[in-house]
Amino acid sequence: MVDVRDAEDLVVEVLRSGAIAQGPMVKRFEDAFASVSGTKHAIAVNNGTTALVAAIQALDLKPGDEVVTSPFTFVATLNAILEAGATVRFADIRRDDFAIDPDAVAAAITDRTKVLMPVHLYGQTADMGKLAPLAAEHGLKIIEDSAQAVGASFQGKPSGSFGIGCFSLYATKNVTTAEGGVITTDDDELADSLRVLRNQGMRARYQYEVAGHNYRMTDLHAAVGIPQLEKLDQLTAARQANAKRLSEGLAGTPGLDVPQVLPGREHVWHQYTVLVGPHAMLSRDEFAAALTERGIGNGIYYPKIVFDYDCYRNHPLIPDAKVEDFPVAASVAAQALSLPVHPHLSESDLDTIIETVREVLGA
């Protein structure tokens, strides 16, 4: 939910300028985002999926080169790898942070693996303390799917600064431009390549250097995002306070596991995701229906392992992927449910959520 009054003056400024495509407002947004991500460069693009696709394309992978990623994620992660023509290999996740397990990643790496793509799910980073050294050991590039983790960090190092960071600015994200994305990097050459790639391969008008694409963000979209970046610390603090209140109130609810903030990690709570375990008096789906009936918003992100759909079965770039090979991801997909945690919740709202959840689960 965006307070449009914060962006109104900047949007009007863009409209009155007569130039609404990519321009100085995008540059202003990029500079602010680079500061948040702790990187030298932030390259704004038109959505988060584009950010992932462009990041992979910029690495110039060859047919058969592999990207290792999580099977428990939004489908954009998988679609981007397939669109870029890379082969997908999955590694199972951990239950405590919903992210890929470093031990499973180590087992998934082959001599064709070129990229490690951890997904920082729900607002907390993956275990970069183990994943980054593992990537370095095997000579892998890191592309962080940070779509849900703007402002998150691992041991003080921001999400998106461990390699190439890819962020989404979709309407539901902690920072939104309605549609938009950002790629972050400290690599000057890579940043230059990405800026050319997003502009139909042009360095200057009609000066074509590569076969590129139209991945540009508009100044109108940037104008919506700038005030949110300026208030990000405040918005994140509100989410963190709400999550703390929910965890305290829901502790001890029968059959319910509340999310953890793991040591050394700054959680920005894109989602507050609980696990409805096998000993709960209701299944996850029954629990969701009961909350909806009582007027409590909730969401299931994501109901299946990402490749467990007909359109991906037998896909040549997803070899030998079987649901049973990822037991933790399969279990979490059947149990995960997200409760409201956004900054605009009142104390009364939080009390109602807690009381209703406990009542429905027989606490």
Image (tube, grey):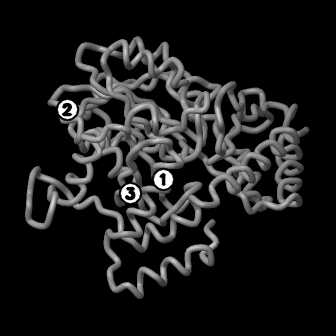
Q: Which residue is mark 3?
A: 47
Amino acid type at circle 1 is Phe
Return the residue nearer the eye: 169 or 290: 169
Quarter in which the N terminus is drawn: bottom right
Q: Which residue is mark 2?
A: 61
- Residue 346 pos. (x, y %): 83, 61
Nearer-N-terminus badge (1/2): 1
**Mark 2–mark 3 distance (CA, rounded to whole Å):** 22 Å
Q: Is residue 293 among what the camera can see? A: yes
Q: Residues within 10 Å of mark 1 (few under 14, many from 20)?
A: many
- Between label 1 and label 2, give the one nearer the viewer: 1
Q: Which residue is mark 1?
A: 33
Q: Which secondary structure, mark 1? A: helix
Q: 298 left or right of 325? A: right
Amino acid type at circle 3 is Asn
Residue located at (48% from left, 65% from top) = 177
**Mark 1–mark 3 distance (CA, rounded to whole Å):** 15 Å
Q: Are marks 1 and 3 in contact (CB under 8 Å)?
A: no
Please say if 356 is above or below 273.
below
Q: Which secondary structure, mark 3? A: loop
Return the residue nearer the eye: 69 or 230: 230
Nearer-N-terminus badge (1/3): 1
Q: Residues within 10 Å of mark 2 (few under 14, many from 20)?
A: some
Residue located at (75% from left, 35% from top) = 258
Nearer-N-terminus badge (2/3): 3
Please say if 130 is above or below 81.
above
**Mark 1–mark 2 distance (CA, rounded to whole Å):** 27 Å
- Between label 1 and label 3, give the one nearer the viewer: 1
